[in-house]
Amino acid sequence: MSLRYAAFDPTWKQRADVAIDTKVCDCCTTTVATTADGLITAYRDRTDDEIRDIYVSRMEGDTWTPGTSVHADNWNINACPTSGQSLAARDRRVAIAWFTAAGDVPRVRVAFSADAGASFPAFQVFGINVLPAGTEDHVLLAPLQKEEAILVHFAHVAGLEIAIWRKCFGGLVGHLPVTLKHIGPLDLNFTYLVGT
């Protein structure tokens, strides 16, 4: 499966149709955010060797940059984990969160950028960073006021466990873990947060 970009004019005449990445994970969702420099998209890449790590591409002018890895997790899995990443952006600051089980160790990871996603030098593992094998995880990010974002981490462990962090774009501010049980099935792959 490929990740593509299309653009249309006000009369719905198509004026662009380009491939951003020609081989991506089939089921993991794609996310897009707007920075001061333009659009940034994040997705789970897929190599011929079935490495499925998180990549980003940025729109510079009318051109999408080649996809680059946010962090070399080197998660080798011959199936779609159905657990996409989440982006939050304000001005030129970007935060991205994702789930990985590289080396059969489930983790939630977060990375930060101060240059509109051109690089992610600040990388951290947060909160429930080692989870039971077989855990299905989803993460969501939304920008809050100024330099803060909220991260919600959903983990299917003995019901649904929700861990919530309010964090700066670059450091942990605080967290409030909440456990909810028996709330019924949720399709977390299609759940979103809206920032303030």
Image (spheres, grey):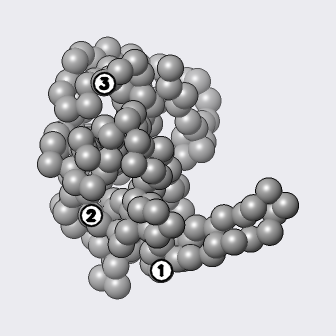
**CA distance separating discs 2 and 3:** 24 Å
Q: Is residue 56 visible?
A: yes
* SS label for mark 1: loop
Q: Residues within 10 Å of mark 1 (few under 14, many from 20)?
A: few
Amino acid type, residue under disc 2 in the picture:
Ser
Compared with 148, 72 (above or below) is below
* SS label for mark 3: loop
Label 1 sits on residue:
22
Answer whether labels 2 and 1 touch (C-beta < 8 Å). no
Amino acid type, residue under disc 3 in the picture:
Glu
Q: Residues within 10 Å of mark 3 (few under 14, many from 20)?
A: some
The answer to whether residue 68 is left or right of residue 65 is left
**CA distance separating discs 2 and 1:** 15 Å
Label 3 sits on residue:
147
Q: Which mark is residue 99?
A: none
* SS label for mark 2: strand
Q: Is residue 161 visible?
A: no
Most extreme residue toward the bottom, as rendered?
48
Q: Which mark is in front, 3 or 1?
A: 3
Q: Position of residue 117 (x, y in %)?
A: 31, 51
**CA distance separating discs 3 and 1:** 34 Å
Q: Nearer the viewer, residue 84 or 10?
A: 10
Q: Which residue appears at 51% of the width and 56% of the height? A: 30
